[in-house]
Each structure stands twice: as C-alpha cells, then as structure tokens.
Amino acid sequence: GQEKGRNRWRMLSGLLAINILLIGSALISGGAFNEVAISENDGHLCLTVLLILTIAWMLFYVCYTAKRRNAVWYKDSHAGPIWLRGGLVLFGLCSFIMDIFKIGYYSGVVPCESPVKLIFPVIQSIFLLVQTYFLWVHAKDCVQIHRGLTRLGLMLTLATNLILWMAAVTDESLHQTVAQKHLNPYLTLNVTQHRSASFASRAGSKASQCECKIKNCEVFKNGYYYLYPFNIEYSLFASAMTYVMWKNVGRQIDDNEHHGKVSCRLHGVLLGPILGILVSVSGLVIFIFYDIDIIIEHKKSEALVMFYTFSTVGLGLMSAASLAGSIIYRFDKRSHASHKNPTRSLDITLLIGSALGQFVLAYYSVVAIVGSRATDRVNALNLTTSLMTILQLCLQNLYIIEGLHREPFKHEAEHLDLVCVNPYVREDSSTDQQNTENTSQNPPTQTQNPETTPSRQTYWNRRAVKEISTFLLLCNIIFWVIPAFGARPQLENDLEMNFYKAQMWVPIVNIGLPFGIFYRMHSVSSLFEVYLSS
Amino acid sequence: GQEKGRNRWRMLSGLLAINILLIGSALISGGAFNEVAISENDGHLCLTVLLILTIAWMLFYVCYTAKRRNAVWYKDSHAGPIWLRGGLVLFGLCSFIMDIFKIGYYSGVVPCESPVKLIFPVIQSIFLLVQTYFLWVHAKDCVQIHRGLTRLGLMLTLATNLILWMAAVTDESLHQTVAQKHLNPYLTLNVTQHRSASFASRAGSKASQCECKIKNCEVFKNGYYYLYPFNIEYSLFASAMTYVMWKNVGRQIDDNEHHGKVSCRLHGVLLGPILGILVSVSGLVIFIFYDIDIIIEHKKSEALVMFYTFSTVGLGLMSAASLAGSIIYRFDKRSHASHKNPTRSLDITLLIGSALGQFVLAYYSVVAIVGSRATDRVNALNLTTSLMTILQLCLQNLYIIEGLHREPFKHEAEHLDLVCVNPYVREDSSTDQQNTENTSQNPPTQTQNPETTPSRQTYWNRRAVKEISTFLLLCNIIFWVIPAFGARPQLENDLEMNFYKAQMWVPIVNIGLPFGIFYRMHSVSSLFEVYLSS
C-alpha cells in the first residue's frame, strides 16, 4: 500500500509538472515569436495565477504541514548545503531589487500599459520572499505526512520556477538581440531587421509612445535589464533545491554519514593554495581590465586576447591538476564506496547536467570558428580556450566523481579531532607508534582495509589530493566570479554571432552561461567535500 | 574493483556520447541557419566518419566480442521486444530505399555537387544493414567481457543515431518550410521570404543550376523526401534499443519472470475487441477520405472537420476506458509488485518520455488557438481534439503504469496451461471446487494474498481489465497508423503555422510526431503486457 501510494503520487505530481511546464513554454514561445503578441498578457496573467497558487501552497506547508507532529522525522544533511542556500539568498536579493525596479518603471507607464504588467512584479516579489524563507528553513526536510499534497506542491513550485527561468531567458534574449542590432549595425540583414523591429516594438516602443510619468524611468528600465542574469540564476537554484526536496519526500533512511566538526585547517597543504590564490588574483585583475577595455571599440580585440590568454592558461593548469589527481586515485588503495547513496548520485547528476551548459557553449564556438575558417589571433585564442574548457570539464568531472566515490579516512579524521595538532609532523617522526595507536583505536577499519595504514606513500597521496583540491577550488571560484559579474566574451566576439545569427546564439548564451555559473559553484562545494574526505 | 571499473566506464562512455552529440548538434545548427553554409559539407564529412567508426565497432562486436566464450551469460528477455525489432526492420527497409533514392539522385548531379553528398548515403545504407542485423541479433545481450569497450561502442552508436535523427529532422523541416511557402503564398512575410529563399537555395537551387544527367531525377528527389519520416522513426527505435543494451552491460541478474507460453486466446472477452475494431475500421475509412480531400483546396476544411471529429470521439472513448480501468484497479486487491525492476522502470520512463511529443503538440495547439481567439468550427474542433489528447495521454499512462505494477495472476496462468479450456465457464459453475484445486496447487500464493482467491468479484474485475486493455490496444493501433502513414493535420491547418511561424512550428511537428508514433507502438506492447498479466 505504501509503495503503491508512493508511485501513484510520484506519477501524478510528475504529470502535473509536465503539464504546467508545457503550457508555460507554449505561452512563452507564442509570445516571443508572434508579431501580434496577443498572448503576451495572457502569458503574464497565467504566470501570476501560477505564482499565487505556489505562494498559497508554500504558506500552507510552512504554517500547517511543517507544524504538525511527526511531519519531519529526518533531515537530509546533504540537501540544501550552505553554498546553495547562500546563493539563493544572494540571487534572491538581486531579483527582489529587479522587481522593485520593474514596479517603479511600470507604475510610471501604467496608464497605457496593461495593469497585468504592474501586478506581475508585485506578486513575483512576494513569491521571492516566501520561497526564499521556505527553502532556507525547509530545504532539508524529509516530509512524512501529507505526502501526496506535498509532492504535488513541490512539483508545482518546480514548474513555476522553471517557467520563470524560461520567461527570464526569453526576455533577456529579446532585449539583447535588440541591443546587438544597435551596437553592430552591419549585422542588420533583412531577417535580423525584420525580427528585431518586431522585438523592439515589444521591448520598448509602446513605452516610448506613452510618456513615462515619473523621474528615473530610464534608470529603472536599464536597472532591471542589468539584474536579469541574477534572476535566471535564482530560478535555477530554487529548482535544484525543490527537486531535492521532492526526492526526499517520504525518505526514512537516517543519514549515517555525520560530518562531525568540519576542520578547515590546511594541515601543511601549501602549494595548492598559493598557486590557486595566484591564479585568482591575476584573474581578478584581468577581469577588471577586460571590463574597462571591452566597451572601447579599438581596444576590444586587445581585451579579448587578454581574456582568452588568461582563460587558456588557467584552464590548462586546472586540467593538469585534475589529471594528476585522477592518476593518484588509480594508485590509491582506499576502499571504494560502493553502497548506493541517493544524495551522491543526485549530486553527480546535477554536476554533469550543469556542466552541459559550458560544453554547449564551447562546442558551438569550436564549430563556428572551424566552420568559418577564421585564422586571426583573437579567434585562434578563442578556439584554444574552447578546447581547453572541454578538456578541463571532462578531467575535473572525472576527478570529482572519483573523489566522491571514496570512503573518507575515518580513523584519521577522528584522530585529528583528538590531538588538535598537525598529525603529519608526528607521523613523520613516529610512524610506528602512530600505527599502534590507530590500530588500538579502530580495529574494525584496520582489519577491513589493511592497506589504509598511514604509510609514507599514503601520506603523500593524501597530501597531493588535498593540494590539488584546494587549487581547483580556488580556480573554480575565479571562473565563477568572472561570468557571474558580467563578462560575456561570447557576445562581444562577433564571430559566433555572425555564424549562428543573434536569434540563435543569444538564447544559447543565455541558457548556457547561468548553467556554467551553477556548475562552478557546485564544483567548489564538491571539491571541498573531496578535500575533507581525503 | 568491479564497482569502481563499472562507474569509471559509465562515466567515460557518457562523456563520449555528450561530446559527440554536442559537436553534431553544433554542426547541424551551424549548417541549417548559416546563409553561407560553409559547414554543410563539413557536417556530412563528420557524419560519414562517425558512421564508419560505428560500423567498425559493430562489426568488431559481432565478429569478435560476441563469439568469445563467456561473452554473454544472460539475455534480458524484456529488452528488444518483437514490436521494437519488427519496427526497426520495417523502418530500416524504408530508410534503405530512401538511401537508394538519394544515391540515384546525387549520382545524377555529382559533377557539380561535392562528392561527399554521394558518399554519405552509400555509407549510411551500409550502416543501416549492419546496425539492423546487430540490433536484431544482439539486442537482448547482457555483455560480460570487454565491458569498457562495449560501453564506449554502444554510446558511440547511440550518439550517431541521435545525430542522424537531428540531421533528418532538420533536413525535413527545411524542406517543408520551403514547401509551405509554395503552398501558402500569403504566408510569405518578409522574414519567411528571406529565410525560405536561403533554404531554397540550399535545398534545391544548386541542383537546378547543374542539369541532372539521368532519367527519373525528380522521382528520386521527391521519393527520398517522402521517406524521411521513416528514417526519423528508425533512428528513434535504434536509439532506444542501444540505450537498453548499454544499461544491460555487465548485468548479472537472471530474469525470474519467464513468460511461459503466451496465450492469446480471448477467454470470453468480447465487448472490448468489437468496440476496438469498430473504432479502428472507422478510423481507417476516415483516414482514406481525409487523404483524398485534404489536397483539394475547397474540401480542406471539411476534411479537417471530419478528422478532428473522429479524433475527439475516439480519444474520448479511450479516456473513458482508461478511467474505468484505473477505478477498477483501486478496488483490486491484488498484491502490488514492489520489488525493484530495472526493465520496468526503463519501460515506464520510455513511455512517459515518448508521450512528451504528443503533449507538446497538443499544448502548443491549445495556446495557439486560445491566443489567436479563433472561434471558427475547424479550430473549435481542433481545440477539443487537443484537450482530449492531453486527457487521454494522462489517463492512459496512469492506467498502463498501474497495470504494469501488478503481480500477474500466476496460479491462474499456470492453471490455464493445464486445462486448455476456457476456465471461467468452469469457475462459474463450480467455483468452490476450483478454489480447492487452486489452493492445493499453489499454497504459498494463497497464503500470501488470501484475497486473490478467484471469486465472482475478481472474475469480473479481471474480465473488465482484459476488455479495456484490448479496446485500448486496438485504438492505439489506429492512432499509430494515421500519423505513421502521412496524415499531418498539424501542418495542414494554418492556424498554428501563422501563430508560431513555419520556422518554429515545422520543427516542433517534426520532432513531436515521430515521438508520438513511438509512444503509440510502445503503448500497444505495454497494453498487451497488462492484458497478459491480468
């Protein structure tokens, strides 16, 4: 009966999400590609209704379901890690500001625009507040009561977030296609012109027909377009967390992997952090110079060359480090964590899934460069960077996944808590004594894996893995910061835009980049886990 | 070590497939949307290389790996069922004829076209022969040796098939967009004109520049465009089978569900088959009339009305039957098959995944009709049909999934084999005696589920499920035949085309319809399984 009910509700909630998603995507694509744009208001109206329903369910959950006895027996300690919740709050804040800008702008033009345009951001800002609170507090819940309703509600939330994501990507792409036209007038082929004109009429012309009644109208308008990327990222974060909650409904296995006290001390690890900080700082400097130079027309190609050179070198170093790590793992005799672990599988799926965004961008660039036989310096470097990105993603994913599949050095970790000094120094001087101590402390572990006795070999292996993980972690942070704070070389370099046309390339970038940002953040957290377990 | 190696190869082969797929999709979209079309030959060259690699691996597998001792211990009896293999051969044959037409056409224009255009169909026809043989013979294999290589090879095959699918969908869409322009000249807005012109120049103008040297050139050309849909379907079938083989690499669980002798006798089931045949025959008649009327301009709307009316009625009956079946299951006391069954999960995933195609078409139609406020008779019926499709898909999926999750009536099935007469007649007359017999034959089953004793209630439940399954099975066949043999009301009705523009709607139809056909065939086989197990 239990199993039967579970399957039925999983089915039903899945069907609900599919249905909502398809209506949403049809409305959005109908609105985007239709010259008459009858359905744009329909779309906003439909989204508003969805938002209200989702808010209602979340309030019901927070105020009623979660307050009941026996509602939540277990908390999944892996779900909703701090980087995800922190990111959610950060991006949620930016989205909230975006909504305030939108409200400001549309309250100025409301006499000639449909009132739906004003109501939508109001409801969306309420939604942001409720959802951020809901996910911050309840992301780890394994719900045990009202399971059917909770599954439906979570799928409703997931679908709403994904539709908001699609709507934001479409809006952003329409806006950038118009901007692109103004920047590169030689791009205006017949087709671009026609379509851009229709986009422009949707994006702004109506507003220009009727006068904006308030001050700072332009500021509001430019402001909310600037904040769109954060909103896209917010929807992705919320979707990931909601999906994990949905997977956890009715889960009854207690987590046996308690992390204990997380110790962030570096334990003699030195080379990795130093190199990582070096790469990060130079990345930051180059990012600032790039941002200054890219808007000056005659310095543009210089800025791109600088950017691509840095990326190639940085990604090359990261690939080498990942490769070295994978080789070390091949000689590592630690036992392989072979038991099924749903959280780990989910983590790995999210990692690979979000990597697809960068894969797509890199491969599309490669094909565009090779296909248009471009041989100038900028594009040769662009090609190298793209190939390096592909290589780096493959090697880093392999390294992280190998690392997550290892059993942690448990007896060592416990030991660290006891002695509170750098144990390697003592190990070096008195390896034999240490061994005896360890054996007496944890006889079962020792008998299971006799190879894990901390020998000199193991010590160097572990230290190497720690060095590599810290280095990769710091590098991933800088490769997260650069796109997250606005570097879009994919749109600045005209080659791909000419090859695929703005109508195709701008959406690809707008979908691919946020996934790339998500991937880098996820990598950072996974590498941190690898560091802790080695 | 086993587990470790398995995960590494799964990872590596997955990465290989992702990389090949992304290169392929970049090449195809670069070729399709680029006016200069530099990369079209690059794309064909790349595909040819992929095909040769795949052929080489399949020959290696057939001639070397499969011939080794211990290569295949178990055969997965659920993998590669007869409908899938039969469909593969049927669609493979049509694709083969398509390739011969292509070779015929391009051998006529080879002096002025690139020779790659001629080599590609030659290699593809060899690929079709090798792959159809490979999948026909080896689809059920659970490979035990050369696991890493086999995983890589299977992922290569999967990626190749998916790229062929994408290429066929793109070619077909380009061709239909041009055809659409010729048929509906009022559609030629600025944008359509420009793009269509560029498509037309790619699709045919080069050929018209240089004279075709052989007779029947036009026949060849029209012939291969007519056969494209079968090639699209072939790629989908091959992809599904390859994926199942990949899942089965290294699987060591022997199938404990032996079907025994399949008994197709109807056992007094009458109403379902009669109603089903009625719907099928009327569907066939309407399909023929539709095909005749749709090409005559003034009878077009009449044909569409007829078609939509039939679809609405048919889908309505199917929805009612599925709903009734689901209600019967609620009162069914049979034990629920709760053990994990990877083949069943895969089956259900494929069922829901392929249903997405029809969902997308239906929802996009609904949004287009509602969005353009169309109130004429044709579109009112179109709306009803779309809504009915959505309802029917939801209800039928729920019914099939509930049915697949039931334990079969094992003691009854065994009993049937023994007595070889319609047992229900005897049951009716001597239920008590029957019960005693059953109990003595299968005591364990009886003690587990005391409710399954064949009472009058159970008898009627089972009979109803059988009636419903046969009815749905026959209806699904006719709803498979109609789109498979060329009815495309989605393209004939201009409303969606005007709403989404041909550039968007034609690809949606070309992607959605083949999945819909796949879904209907899959449903037929699943319903047959439900029939057998009830």
Image (cartoon, coloured by chain):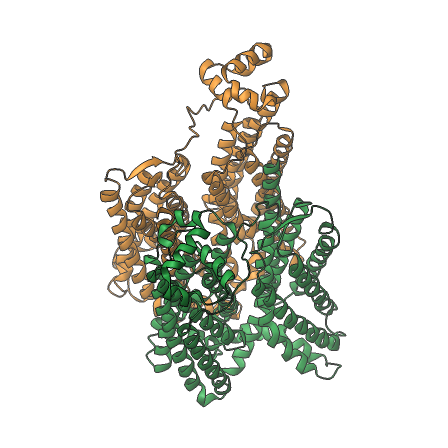
Chain colours: A green, B orange
Q: Position of residue A39 (x, y in %)?
A: 65, 62
Tell me: B526 left or right of B332.
left
The residue lying toward the viewer, choosing from B191 and A465, is A465
Position of residue B229 measured from the top left corner of the image (x, y, whole percent): 42, 49
The image quarter containing residue A259 is bottom right
The answer to whether any part of residue B23 appears in the image is no
Residue at the (51%, 60%) spot, across then down? A418
User: Is residue A480 found left or right of A246 in the rendered image?
Assistant: left
In this rendering, the answer to whether B142 lies above or below A423 is: above
Residue visible at 40% across and 82% down in the picture: A305
Quarter location, residue B103: bottom left
Nearer the observer, A176 or A140: A140
Q: Quadrant of residue A498?
A: bottom left
The percent position of residue A362, horizontal first and vertical second, equals 41, 69
Nearest the viewer among A157 and B482 is A157
Query: x, y (%) of residue B518?
Result: 46, 44
Residue at 70 percent across and 65 percent down: it is A129
Quadrant containing the C terminus of chain B in the rendered view:
top right
